[in-house]
């Protein structure tokens, strides 16, 4: 299970990574207005959440006494490098925690603000929370970059090409390496490597 969690979260992290690569120092601090968050602020909140929730997650409450959530929405970064470094620190903490998950503790109880929840549920909550904010980061960046934006997913008007590529990637030749003992194409024949 943890491998699946890690794979999914690595994908969402990569969206943020690829977005930061496209942004200038000035753009990462840009705010639409006083009430909106810059990308820098969103990163500060995300990494702050990760550090609080996942440091000693099996033995300590996920809302640490040292966390000041309100301060996460006040920028004190000076450079893009500081922002990216904090982003990496948060993810490292989170991935280290995911690597501690196993069959024995997956359904253990942890606490966030005193509220009990299963480890698996805490991960699912973040699978909704982190991509939500990463989507904000991508959306803000895409608006700023406009025509200079390099898409992170299927390019506009390229869906058919992408679908063809995926079908080719997972073509019938891949089925031949499937671990099923029964051959495909409605055949009842058992593959040679499974014969006794």
Image (cartoon, rainbow, N blue to C red):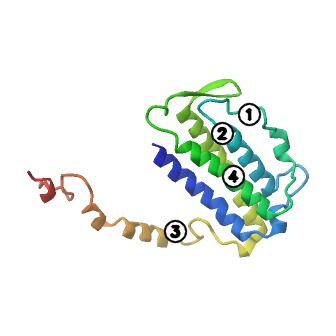
Rendering coords of residue 61 (x, y %): 67, 29
**To which residue does mark 2 refer?**
55
Mark sitting on residue 159: 3
Drawn side of residue 180 relative to residue 195, left or right: right
Label 4 to label 2: alpha-carbon separation = 11 Å
Which class describes the residues within 10 Å of circle 2: few (<14), some (14-19), or many (20+)? Answer: some
Of the residues under marks 3 and 4, which one precedes in the sequence?
4
Q: Is residue 123 visible?
A: yes
Drawn side of residue 80 relative to residue 61, left or right: right
Label 4 SS = helix
Which class describes the residues within 10 Å of circle 3: few (<14), some (14-19), or many (20+)? Answer: few
**To which residue does mark 4 refer?**
89
Which class describes the residues within 10 Å of circle 4: few (<14), some (14-19), or many (20+)? Answer: some
Q: Are marks 1 and 4 in contact (CB under 8 Å)?
A: no
Q: Are marks 4 and 2 in contact (CB under 8 Å)?
A: no
Q: Are marks 3 and 1 in contact (CB under 8 Å)?
A: no
Label 2 to label 3: alpha-carbon separation = 41 Å
**To which residue does mark 1 refer?**
64
Which class describes the residues within 10 Å of circle 1: few (<14), some (14-19), or many (20+)? Answer: some
Label 1 SS = loop
Q: Are marks 2 and 3 in contact (CB under 8 Å)?
A: no
Label 1 to label 4: alpha-carbon separation = 16 Å
Rendering coords of residue 10 (x, y %): 56, 55
Q: Please tell me whether mark 2 or mark 3 is closer to you in this view.
A: 2
- Quarter-wise, where is residue 175 in the image? bottom left
Q: Please tell me whether mark 3 or mark 1 is closer to you in this view.
A: 1
């Amino acid at each position: 299970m943890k491998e699946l969690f890690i794979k999914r979260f690595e994908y969402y992290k990569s969206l943020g990574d690829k977005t930061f690569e496209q942004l200038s120092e000035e753009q990462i601090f840009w705010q639409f207005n006083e009430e909106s968050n810059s990308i820098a602020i969103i990163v500060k909140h995300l990494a702050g959440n990760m550090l609080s929730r996942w440091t000693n997650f099996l033995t300590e409450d996920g809302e640490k006494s040292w966390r000041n959530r309100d301060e996460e929405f006040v920028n004190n970064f000076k450079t893009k490098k500081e922002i990216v470094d904090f982003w990496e620190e948060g993810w490292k903490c989170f991935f280290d925690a995911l690597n501690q998950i196993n069959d024995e503790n997956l359904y253990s109880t942890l606490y966030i603000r005193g509220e009990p929840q299963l480890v698996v549920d805490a991960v699912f909550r973040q699978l909704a929370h982190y991509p939500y904010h990463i989507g904000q980061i991508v959306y803000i960046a895409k608006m700023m970059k406009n025509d200079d934006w390099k898409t992170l997913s299927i390019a506009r008007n390229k869906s058919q090409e992408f679908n063809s590529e995926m079908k080719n990637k997972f073509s019938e030749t891949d089925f031949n390496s499937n671990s099923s003992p029964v051959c495909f194409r409605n055949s009842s024949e058992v593959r040679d490597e499974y014969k006794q």
